[in-house]
Image (cartoon, rainbow, N blue to C red):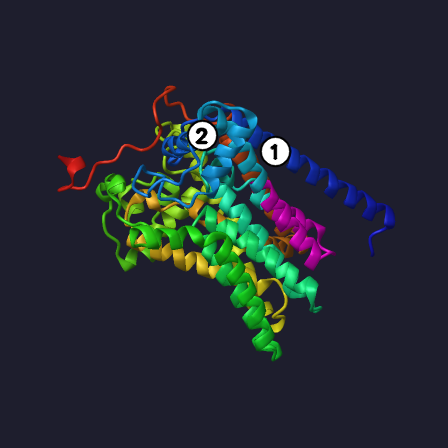
Amino acid sequence: MSESPAGSTRGEKALVLGGVLLAVAAIAIRINNAFRYPPRWGFDAMFNERYVERLLGSFALPAPDTDWSTAHPPLFYYLSAALGRLSGVSDSLGVITPTRLLGSLAGLAMAWLAFRLVRRNHPREPVRALLAAGLLLFLPVHLYMSAMFNEEILAAGLTSIAIVAACVALSRQNSGTSTWARDVGIGVVAGLALLAKLTGALVIAATALAYLWAGAREGKLTAAARRAAVVAIVAGVVGGWFYVRNLALYGYIYPQDLSTHSVMFSMPPGERHVTDYLRVPLATFTDPQVLHPDLLRSVWGTTYLSAWYEGHGHFLPKHEPRVKRIGTTLLLLALLPTVAFGVGAKRAVRRAWREPRGPDAALLLLTGLTLLGYVGFTWANPMFATVKAGYLLGIGVPFAYFASDALAGWISRGGVVAALVWIVLGALLVGVCLAFTYGIGLWNLTPPGVTPGLQWTPLPGTPEAA
């Protein structure tokens, strides 16, 4: 029997209500965390604050080796300092909360983009669109990185805008001024992503390759190459000048092994092996903290626990039994959306071949390039502190788009399968809200003024070990 109009209307109202409730909860958690999470806690937060403090006095760009964070691309720091100056804040501490709120807005935009991309390409699947938004809104790494004073959420938001705009531009067949304007706009946003973080280069490459892929499949490679060149050139002008400046003044495009970062060289494990990328130990679920001996030797195990939990000790306390229990629970429940991501990505490969102008090729390219870049980065920097899911936030929209595809398909089967999917996702949602609403659920109990984080033993033979 077909669904009655009244039943359909009730279903639509339930979806709208569910979407509103999810959005309100997600926004409330981020606002709470922005105000209540200690201002100097989080990855590099103290160093980032010092950089902004300099900029509140002078907008002169410092040398990369001046301080810990001065080697980073400057967009986040200049935006934060400009926000402080416009609001009349006299010191960097007063800038932190407004900047966190701005970053949270960029993160919320990612969820909205995932929602709109699904609605645009699959208008008859409202449940899938809601799932796509929810997966990002309540992804633990997305929540706790939104509370921290660093550039990751901003860079991911700009990357998401650029890649979704590229997906929309690819789907349109028209040419002329409007096409050029769109490509210039994509280049500007991608360039800003590059100016926020080096990983912005990946969205530039993914967009250009997606254009070339569609052009090659349709026999229009020359026109596609022109469009790819426009995006790359504009992005290079907007965001590449910082790296060109580094090369001209200091002899490198991006700094590596600066003396100001010397403490990193004493962090375990100190070297990488191929097997570090081939195993996910049981400790990922039973003892989810990055200094576990097995997890030091598992890049993907540590990445997984930092995506769905937080293993570095900067947001959640690590030595309380209740925290470990909820960590294990969340990580087990999260297997469902993680597997769904893999299944959805596999389906997307087939679609990208059949429909070169669809969104799948661009999203797959961004995902593949980001994962390859992450492997290269963790190989070149074999320290536990460099293995973080926060570095992968730029593929948040592809994750939501692909995972929601598989999840919606399983739900559409109805019966026991659909019930199990909803139960797991509901339990995951409740657990994430309890764990990552700072000051209400499971929050870090480190005494005020003490920087959180795991205590680690320096590698033998390093100055820190002496």
Query: Looking at the image, which residue is at 41% across and 31% down?
Result: 49
Highlighted range, magenta: 107-133
Query: Looking at the image, which residue is at 81% across and 43% down?
Result: 10
* Residue type, mark 2 in image: Leu
Q: Residue pushed farthest bottom?
A: 219
Residue at mark 2 = 56
Q: Is residue 117 magenta?
A: yes
Task: Quadrant for the N terminus, please.
Answer: bottom right
- Quarter occupied by residue 325: top left
Where is residue 322? Give x, y as percent: 42, 28
Task: Please state which of residues 325 and 272 is positioned toward the viewer in this rendering.
Answer: 272
Residue at mark 1 = 27
Task: Please state which of residues 400 and 59 is positioned toward the viewer in this rendering.
Answer: 59
Left or right, 200 with reference to 106: left
Q: Residue pushed farthest right?
A: 5
Secondary structure mainly formed by the magenta segment = helix
Task: Please state which of residues 195 and 417 is positioned toward the viewer in this rendering.
Answer: 195
Classify 452 as above or below 363.
above
- Quarter occupied by residue 41: top left
Classify 107 as above or below 212.
above
Q: Is residue 458 magenta?
A: no
Sequence-first disc among 1 and 2: 1
